[in-house]
């Protein structure tokens, strides 16, 4: 019979309950949900900048298509791939895309999506 380390079953039982992959705490303020306090704090900064007229067109959770749906014989055989930007806004006529990142959340998939956004749209994602 295989042996199990002490506490392993307890840890397995609680896996995924009230915790996130990156151990951030999701928050909800005024009906808006944020993946982390860091993301919320950046949103507040950007809202102040928008009110001051420094930036305009501020949006959250903007879906950007990277690869469209692929159809064969009028049937979708591969769904589209997207990148969801934490923030998007205009500053001095330039479109800015931001992602609230900490070092542990910069994954290989994120790096690939960042490169695709730059290649397809000519926009460098700013990590804050």
Image: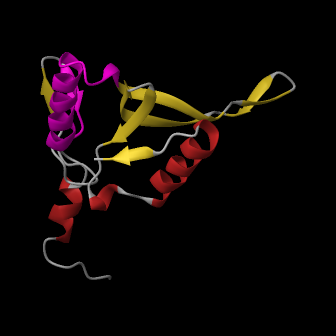
Give coordinates of residue 115: x percent, y percent.
55, 51
Along the line of sight, which residue is nearer the eye, 43 or 31?
Answer: 43
Q: Which residues are magenta?
A: 32-59
Scheme by which the image is coloured: secondary structure
In the displayed structure, would residue 21 be above or below residue 57? Answer: below
Instruction: Say left or right for 20 vs 92.
Output: left
Q: Residue at x 23, y 61 (%)?
A: 12
Q: Residue at x 32, y 19 (%)?
A: 56
Q: Does 51 appear in magenta?
A: yes
Q: Residue at x 30, y 24 (%)?
A: 55
Q: Residue at x 20, y 21 (%)?
A: 32
Q: Quadrant of residue 37?
A: top left
Along the line of sight, which residue is nearer the eye, 11 or 95?
Answer: 95
In the image, farthest residue toward the front:
92
Instruction: Say left or right for 51 vs 59.
Output: left
Instruction: Say left or right for 119 vs 1.
Output: right
Image quadrant occupied by the N terminus? bottom left
Give coordinates of residue 7: x percent, y percent.
13, 71
Give coordinates of residue 23: x percent, y percent.
19, 53
Q: Quadrant of residue 8?
A: bottom left
Give coordinates of residue 17: x percent, y percent.
20, 46
In the displayed structure, would residue 92 be above or below residue 39? Answer: above
Instruction: Say left or right for 4 vs 7.
Output: right
In the displayed structure, would residue 54 be above or below residue 21? Answer: above
């Amino acid at each position: 019979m295989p042996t199990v380390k002490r506490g392993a079953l307890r840890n397995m039982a609680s896996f995924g309950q009230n915790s996130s992959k990156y151990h951030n705490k999701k928050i909800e303020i005024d009906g808006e949900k944020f993946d982390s306090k860091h993301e919320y704090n950046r949103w507040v900064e950007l809202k102040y900048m928008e009110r001051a007229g420094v930036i305009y067109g501020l949006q959250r959770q903007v879906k950007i298509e990277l690869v469209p749906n692929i159809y064969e014989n009028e049937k979708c055989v591969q769904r589209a791939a997207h990148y969801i930007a934490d923030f998007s806004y205009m500053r001095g006529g330039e479109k800015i895309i931001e992602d609230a990142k900490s070092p542990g959340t910069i994954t290989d998939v994120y790096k690939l999506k960042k490169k695709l956004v730059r290649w397809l749209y000519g926009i460098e994602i700013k990590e804050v």
